[in-house]
Amino acid sequence: MQNMDNMTLIVAIIVAVIVAVAVGWLVSQRRRQTHLRERFGPEYDRAVAAVGTTGKAATVLERREKRVAAYHIRPLSDDERRGFSAAWQHTQAKFVDDPAAAVTEADALVSEVMTTRGYPMAEFDRRAEDLTVEHASVIDHYRAAREIVERHVRHEASTEDLRQALMHYRALFADLLNDRPEARRSA
């Protein structure tokens, strides 16, 4: 009888440990998912849709975070910020006379800010992925602007479409220009 009680106690302890480990794992996964949802916003759902599961999406997004963490991304100096702001004002003013040139210039200006900040300028999809780590709230603007530019190249975009592209670029540009990583980390 004593032997049976000891065996029951051991089985109960093993079951309790297994349950505790499972609960701990579930809590850890929930925290991981919450962190990634907060960090990436709609990009998290986009990643889930692209790879099929939350676990795979989490792995993709965490790899992206690690990759971008290895870059030497820096805030702009006040002089650089003023210079880019002036260039943007010139680009926006150009839209009235030459919408297509203004949008092309806006794309180039966004690329220049990214390069100055330290983002590698790989192909568009890689740039967009990299930007999602620190600029997830505006990445859809970048994608929308690029889609309009691609339609423009095929002569399928109207002047209103080009205006929309410029507005999309402006949202990303403003986020890149005013980004202060040290302020974000302390918040």
Image: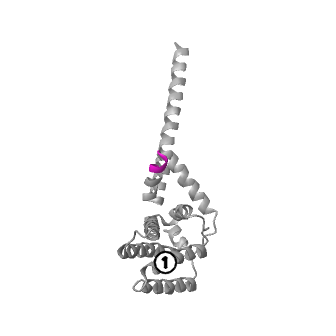
Where is residue 103 drawn, in percent x and y?
Answer: 46, 77
Which residue is found at the position 47% from the left and 59% from the top? 40
**Residue farthest toward the top in the current orientation of the protein:** 1
Question: Is residue 163 shown above or below 141?
Answer: below
Residue type at mark 1: give it: Ala
- Find residue 137 and report its image quarter: bottom left
Q: Nearer the viewer, residue 141 or 147?
A: 147
Display colour scheme: one colour
Judged from this view, the residue extending furthest toward the front is 155
Q: Secondary structure at mark 1?
A: helix
Q: Is residue 50 magenta?
A: yes
Q: Give 69 or 186, whichever is nearer the viewer.
A: 69
Total tally of numbered discs in the picture: 1
Residue that badge 1 annotates: 106
Chief secondary structure of the magenta portion: helix
Magenta extent: 48-52
Q: Is residue 131 magenta?
A: no
Residue shown at 50%/69% (left/top)?
Answer: 184
Vertical relation: 33 (above or below) 77: above
The residue at the point 53 percent across, 33 percent down is 17
Residue 157 x/y as whole percent: 39, 70
85, above or below 55, in the image: below
- Give coordinates of residue 174: x percent, y percent: 46, 76
Name the image quarter holding residue 71.
Answer: bottom right
Q: Residue at x 64, y 62 (%)?
A: 70
